[in-house]
Amino acid sequence: MTAKPRLFSGMQPSADSLHLGNYIGALLSWKELQETHEAFFFLADLHAITVPQDPTALRENTRRTAAQYIAAGIDPSRSTLFVQSHVPAHAQLAWVLNTITGFGEASRMTQFKDKAAKQGNDAASVGLFTYPILQAGDILLYQANQVPVGEDQRQHVELTRDLATRFNSRFGETFTVPEAYILKETAKVFDLQNPQSKMSKSSESPAGIVWVMDDEKTTAKKIMRAVTDADASVTFDRENKPGVANLLTIFSVLGERSIESLENEFAGRGYGDLKKALAELVTSILGPIRTRTLELLDDPAELDRILAINADRASEVAEATLAQVYDRMGFLPRATLR
Ligand code: ATP
Ligand code: LTN
């Protein structure tokens, strides 16, 4: 039997709920990929503090995000699902990688430039600047072959590959050079109120975001009020009819049906019918995930126990890589005391 390829991905626990974009764009693929890969999924809490976080909220959001991963189908007895700060090797490897990253190289990261501009450049922290290096360490610690992420993360995976190659050539073969597994563009979800922009937790229009933890009534209402256009024909045209195209995309992915079959089914019927059917579909999927999440959150001790077992599993792999890195760097090993 050949070993399954290793997969590594994660999200920042920076909100109390995931949204439909995270579910369709990331979790659905992760769930599928865990069948064919040896998967590691984590909650990037060290990354989350690169922008100001309220400590109480961060702790709560970390549990809530973990519960939503599990409720959405990430199986913690099959995939390794853990919290980044539970495995100190992440911070340790990031430090080493900092020292082989060029200042200019890090300065070219577009996500940093965007996020720093948003905060006002003076307010941005050095942690935000080195965020991609921490991310490189996450991936390299697990010797991952593939990293499923959205297009916006491609540059960070490229940096990871460069750092891996550089380290290997300077200090000897140590890291697997990973590949980005770019999630399908067809799985991109747009804001319901502003269908030119992607659905994002930092969006300005609360009515444009479907939260996994919204109750069913709220979800249905948001879908019924989604922006469409005056034309009233249910056809897929991303350029001219982005609102309708977005609804059709969501329907197609969640209903596992082709866009064409949806166009046929709703031909000659108004947007109201399409939205009503979509609202039923979305709530029938998100409803049970929300219920399961709340059940998991009802027993935080059990959830924390699952995360601890998984952190142990992750640590084993991470510690082995870090030990090799420390050795290659020339750090003096600490003697074992008798
Ligand atoms: P932010 O508002 O901070 O950009 P976000 O809500 O866009 O956050 P991220 O934390 O950046 O979400 O992304 C987590 C994962 O979800 C990534 O793998 C990303 O590709 C995916 N994702 C985020 N938004 C969408 C979307 N609208 N459609 C599809 N996938 C998405
Ligand atoms: N930057 C990613 C989260 C993230 C990540 C990672 C994803 C941090 N470390 C390692 C994949 C692999 C994001 O914001 N989606």
Image (cartoon, grey):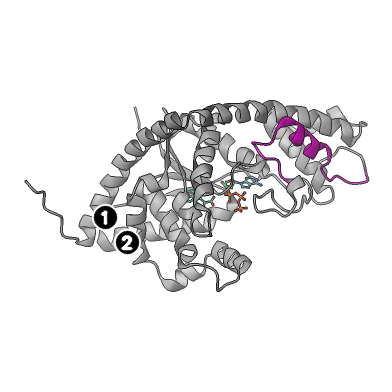
Q: Pick out the residue farthest to the left.
A: 338
Disc 1 secondary structure class: helix
Given residues 45 and 150, the one toward you in this image is 45
Left/right placement of residue 80 relative to residue 257 reads left
Q: Residue 153 appears in which quarter of the rendering?
A: bottom right
Query: Is residue 220 inside the magenta stretch?
Result: yes
Magenta stretch: helix, strand or loop mostly: loop
Measured from the top left, where is residue 303 in percent x and y?
Answer: 45, 32
Residue drawn at (92%, 40%), measured in percent from left and top?
232
Please say if 288 is above or below 323.
Answer: above
Q: Residue 3 appears in which quarter of the rendering?
A: top left
Residue drawn at (20%, 56%), measured in percent from left and top?
327
Q: Residue 142 appears in which quarter of the rendering?
A: top left
Measured from the top left, where is residue 54 in percent x and y?
Answer: 53, 53
Residue drawn at (64%, 49%), measured in percent from left and top?
201
Q: Pick out the residue farthest to the front.
A: 56
Query: Is residue 243 inside the magenta stretch?
Result: no
Q: Which mark is residue 96?
A: 2
Whether residue 5 is visible to the viewer of this picture, yes or no, is yes
Residue position marked by numbered label 1 in the rendering: 325
Given residues 216 and 324, the one toward you in this image is 216
Left/right placement of residue 139 relative to residue 11 reads left
Badge 1 density bin: few <14, some 14–19, many ≥20, Cα 10 Å = many
Measured from the top left, where is residue 209 in percent x and y?
Answer: 71, 45
Disc 2 secondary structure class: helix
Badge 2 density bin: few <14, some 14–19, many ≥20, Cα 10 Å = some
Instruction: Kindly report the distance in space between the C-alpha atoms of the residues bearing marks 2 and 1.
Output: 8 Å
Left/right placement of residue 273 relative to residue 144 reads right
Find out if the beta carbon at label 2 lies less than 8 Å from the nearest ligand 2 atom: no
**Mark 1: amino acid:** Val
- The answer to the question of whether label 2 and label 1 lie on touching residues, with beta carbons closer than 8 A, is yes
First to last magenta residue range: 209-231
